[in-house]
Amino acid sequence: MEVAAQSVPQRSFGIDYDCNCFVKDGKPFRYISGSIHYARVPRYYWKDRLLKMKMAGLDAIQTYVPWNYHESEPGLYNFSGDRDVEYFLQLANETGLLVILRAGPYICAEWDMGGLPAWLLEKESIILRSSDLDYLASVDKWMGVFLPKMKPLLYQNGGPIIMVQVENEYGSYFACDYNYLRYLQKLFRHHLGEDAVLFTTDGASRSYLRCGALQGLYATVDFAPGCNVTAAFLSQRSSEPTGPLVNSEFYTGWLDHWGHRHSFVPAQLVAKSLSEILARGANVNMYMFIGGTNFAYWNGANMPYTPQPTSYDYDAPLSEAGDLTEKYFALREVIGMYKSLPEGPIPPTTPKFAYGQVQMEKIGTLLEVLDDLSPSGPVKSIYPLTFVQLKQVRPFLVTVKHFGKYVLGVTPSKVKALHQRLPLVHYILQQLT
């Protein structure tokens, strides 16, 4: 029995700086990955989307973890249903996909507050994404809950996670706080161990890497189709003279903004640049491979203020609805030039249904139904108050100037009268709470 146990090879994943490559189970390894955010795809469709990604020839998926999606209030954690990240990762493992986990605490991702919980701002002096003690204390508590859930899912422990990102594009932030990155590095090591491959991601420029990279965290870059691939990877070499070349965000499309046209990036351009990356033996993650949907009010915004819409389609190879696109097959063809594609049928595009007309009844203007929407009455203040001061994280506040004072209406958790009259409106209002 002991001899048989010793003959079983130990699972391992690491970096070989001599061969400029990753090493998986003792052999050189190059991954081709795609981004999928579990928070933007209903649980019911996870298996379908993951299988379609596998059949495109991907070795791995990459996903963000939005802190505020799991801890909406301090100390109240939700990892069930669509938030069951452990099940999502196990499903990826069963599908034969490795996982690159982008654990935050900040994720960007065009997500509400970049994944940071709004309740952090209740401490008015807090400095986010820094070595501010109040901020670090909250990060420590969150990671103390989340990272232990991830440790059994590391590749060396039998799970799918081969790499874990620390923070996100920190070199693009106004701060340059190396103590913050060192704190995160120590925190991640404490919970995940010394064998976990930790990395950072920044724009392919020395100016971004100057504050985004840290010794002990493997520095990777991101860049778009049409960029000079050689120059982009040379910027990575300024931080990592040896080791694998990695584009952690190779953009298959782009994000949308309210009031702007839907973003479009030609499939031929994406395919050409992907081939250039793979021809250099580099590792790549396609962002996004499927964008999905910003359900409820989880969409973010860029500065100057340009909010993202509900759709996060991203002009990705798999559409928002999980449809197979021309871009999907174009990229699959390129991937097939550099590795064997899996055999078997590709799951078809999801059937669509015609729901017909939806009858709507006008019940009044917003100001006319404020008493119903805010049965507790207005909050009166000489000066306008912030969402955080009212503990109203989302979605709306109504500000009315009345006799020189501001009256702010806050949405309720239930509106019984409207529920009796129009269930659809009740449902929508339930999503507002």
Image (cartoon, rainbow, N blue to C red):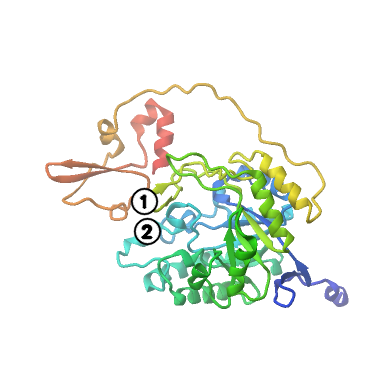
Amino acid residing under circle 1: Val
| Foreground pick, 310 / 12 | 310
The 10 Å Cα crowd at callout 2, few under 14, some 14 to 19, many 20 or more, is some
Where is residue 212? Give x, y as percent. 50, 70
Where is residue 185? Give x, y as percent. 53, 74
| Foreground pick, 125 / 253 | 253
Badge 2 is on which residue? 119
What's the residue at 83%, 76% (across, down)?
6
Q: Quadrant of residue 367?
A: top left
Badge 1 is on which residue? 393
Element at badge 1? Answer: loop
Element at badge 2? Answer: helix
Q: Marks 2 and 1: in contact by CB < 8 Å?
A: yes
Quadrant where the N terminus sits is bottom right
What's the residue at 12%, 45% (across, down)?
404
What's the residue at 46%, 42% (across, down)?
309
In this view of the protein, can residue 55 be seen by the observer?
no
What's the residue at 45%, 67% (across, down)?
139
Quadrant where the C terminus sits is top left
